[in-house]
Image (cartoon, helix red, strand yellow):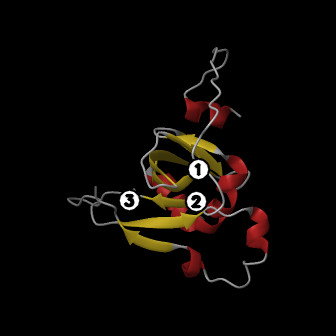
């Protein structure tokens, strides 16, 4: 799609090289940052939809990648992959998303006059397969699977 190509920095008619990686670790945790404040607001309003769509739309990710996630046929949110932690908790440049990969979204709030965005809260989401969600939707409250955490400082 044109939106996906734009996120990858591809233009019409460009030649690309594809490289196969034989062994790619599974991501335990992925830290992402919305590309814009509009993207952040969409994440806040549609966190459950984002959780259900991530694994349906992406499998392999890398640091620096801008991941487009279609929340609906007309709603696109873009997040930049900033850090990836493998199952052994080491930082890796590329990984595979799987069920239960934790996605931590750093806030990107609109700046008020004279105020910065420090002190915002991260959102933590769990990547779940769509068939897994069907049985849980009526049993869970959004706060059960969507827990804000303090911004991670490294």
Q: Which residue is mark 1?
A: 26
Q: Can residue 131 be seen in this snapshot? A: yes
For the residues bearing labels 2 and 1, Cβ distance under 8 angstroms: yes
Which mark is first along the chain, 1 or 2?
A: 1
Q: As rendered, which of 25 and 144 lies closer to the eye?
A: 25
Residue 137 location (% of width, % of height): 72, 78
Q: Is residue 133 above or below residue 64?
A: below
Mark 3 vs mark 1: in front: 1
Q: As rendered, which of 149 and 19 lies closer to the eye?
A: 19
Q: Which residue is mark 3?
A: 109
Q: Which residue is mark 2?
A: 101
Which mark is first along the chain, 2 or 3?
A: 2
Which residue is rendered at x = 40% and y = 71% of the image? 149
Mark 3 vs mark 2: in front: 2
Q: On the picture, is 96 further left or further right than 29?
A: right
Residue 87 location (% of width, % of height): 52, 55
Q: Which residue is at the far left?
A: 114
Which quarter of the figure has residue 151?
Answer: bottom left
Which residue is rendered at x = 66% and y = 46% of the image? 58
Which quarter of the figure has residue 129?
Answer: bottom right
Residue 148 location (% of width, % of height): 44, 72
Q: Secondary structure at mark 1?
A: loop
Q: CA distance from mark 2 to mark 1?
A: 8 Å
Q: As rendered, which of 129 and 23 lies closer to the eye?
A: 23
Which mark is first along the chain, 1 or 3?
A: 1
Which residue is rendered at x = 38% and y = 59% of the image? 109
For the residues bearing labels 3 and 2, Cβ distance under 8 angstroms: no
For the residues bearing labels 3 and 1, Cβ distance under 8 angstroms: no
Q: How many C-alpha atoms fall within 10 Å of the one at disc 2: few (<14), some, or many (≥20)? A: many
């Amino acid at each position: 799609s044109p939106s996906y190509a734009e996120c990858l920095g591809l233009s019409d008619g460009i030649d690309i090289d594809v490289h196969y990686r034989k062994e790619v670790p599974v991501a335990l945790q992925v830290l992402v940052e919305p590309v814009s404040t509009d993207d952040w607001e969409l994440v806040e309003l549609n966190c459950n939809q984002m959780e259900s769509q991530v694994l349906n739309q992406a499998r392999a990710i890398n640091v620096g990648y801008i991941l487009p996630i279609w929340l609906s046929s007309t709603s696109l949110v873009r997040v930049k992959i900033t850090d990836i932690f493998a199952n052994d908790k080491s930082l890796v440049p590329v990984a595979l998303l799987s069920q239960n990969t934790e996605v931590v979204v750093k806030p990107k709030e609109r700046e008020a006059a004279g105020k910065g965005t420090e002190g915002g809260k991260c959102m933590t989401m769990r990547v779940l397969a769509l068939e897994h969600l069907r049985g849980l939707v009526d049993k869970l409250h959004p706060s059960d699977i969507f827990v804000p955490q303090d911004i991670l400082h490294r």
